[in-house]
Image (spheres, helix red, strand yellow):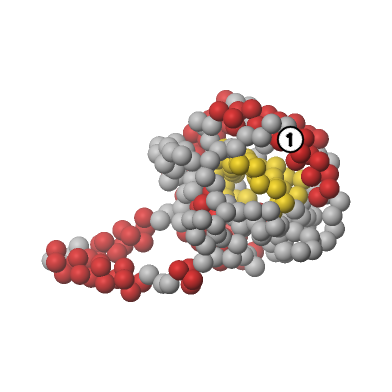
């Protein structure tokens, strides 16, 4: 997979405005969402640290930075986030709690919260109060099978337009220099009509253990993963449509 883009200045400004506007709305899961916002500008903290060290001699600066890294790094168990794979061998699977996310919609520049539509509890302050089954399709501009998959997902969205179903495209895995503006231009040129979210830090794909594209995750109305497709599957749309017809009828969490 190619190196992921770090995002552009316009998106960082939009995210800053969104944080201020939505800060009071966050409840359960807000710490994870805060981390995802913070990671969109990861260099700020590093730049501040380097500025403080620059006035010291080379050896003193080296010693201070090394000591800071050793002392500041918490144990792995303390940095684990609920719903996030804990190691490189862990893989998102059916029955797992879907990792929460908040990312920008490329077309609207507005933040999209997974918890607005599904989860143990919906986000307080959300305009939506109805639980939805959610389909997340991870894709990239260079992914050839994605060009076949996305139109079929678009037809599926029309099939369920009157049902509590949300289908999101999650752009990820782009090369350096492929900005959010690039995503917008591509979506327009290919005439994609599904909401296109931008995982410009790669955080969402990492938490969903995306190792190749395309990848589809189907989440029920209570935030539980019910299907994972890694790679392009023939007739995938028929299988997912059948599953969605089942999920929209469920009115209580899946019992283990």
Spot occupied by residue 132 in the image (x, y as percentages of width and height): 76, 51
Disc 1 on helix, strand or loop?
Answer: helix
Q: Residue at x 59, y 65 (%)?
A: 82
The residue at the far bottom in this view is 71
Left or right placement of residue 154 versus residue 69 in this view: right
Spot occupied by residue 201 in the image (x, y as percentages of width and height): 47, 49
Q: Is residue 250 above or below residue 217?
A: below
Left or right placement of residue 211 versus residue 43 in this view: right
Q: Is residue 74 above or below residue 233?
A: below
Residue 52 position by quadrant: bottom left
Q: Residue at x 53, y 36 (%)?
A: 140
* Front in this rendered view, residue 19 or 208: 208
Quadrant where the C terminus is found in the figure: bottom right
Q: Residue at x 46, y 56 (%)?
A: 39
Left or right placement of residue 100 versus residue 222 in this view: left
Residue underneath mark 1: 237
Q: Is residue 19 visible?
A: no
Q: Is residue 206 above or below residue 149?
A: below
Tally of numbered tags = 1
Q: Residue at x 76, y 39 (%)?
A: 239
Spot occupied by residue 158 in the image (x, y as percentages of width and height): 78, 34
């Amino acid at each position: 997979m190619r190196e992921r883009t770090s995002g552009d200045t316009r998106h960082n400004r939009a995210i800053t405005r969104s944080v201020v506007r939505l800060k009071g709305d966050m409840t359960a899961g807000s710490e994870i969402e805060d981390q995802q916002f913070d990671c969109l500008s990861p260099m700020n903290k590093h730049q501040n640290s380097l500025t403080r060290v620059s006035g010291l001699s080379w050896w003193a600066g080296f010693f201070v930075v090394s000591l800071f890294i050793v002392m500041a790094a918490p144990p792995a168990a303390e940095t684990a986030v609920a719903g996030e794979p804990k190691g490189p061998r862990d893989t998102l699977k059916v029955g797992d709690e879907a990792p929460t996310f908040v990312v920008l919609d490329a077309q609207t520049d507005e933040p999209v919260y997974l918890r607005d539509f599904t989860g143990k509890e919906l986000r307080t302050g959300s305009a939506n109060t109805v639980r939805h089954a959610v389909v997340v399709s991870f894709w990239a501009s260079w992914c050839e099978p994605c060009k076949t998959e996305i139109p079929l997902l678009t037809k599926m969205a029309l099939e369920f337009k009157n049902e509590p179903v949300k289908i999101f495209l999650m752009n990820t895995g782009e090369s350096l220099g492929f900005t959010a503006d690039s995503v917008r231009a591509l979506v327009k040129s290919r005439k994609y009509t599904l909401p296109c979210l931008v995982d410009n830090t790669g955080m969402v794909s990492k938490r969903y253990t995306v190792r190749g594209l395309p990848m589809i995750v189907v989440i029920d109305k209570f935030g539980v993963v019910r299907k994972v497709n890694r790679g392009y599957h023939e007739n995938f749309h028929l299988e997912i449509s059948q599953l969605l017809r089942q999920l929209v009828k469920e009115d209580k969490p899946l019992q283990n």
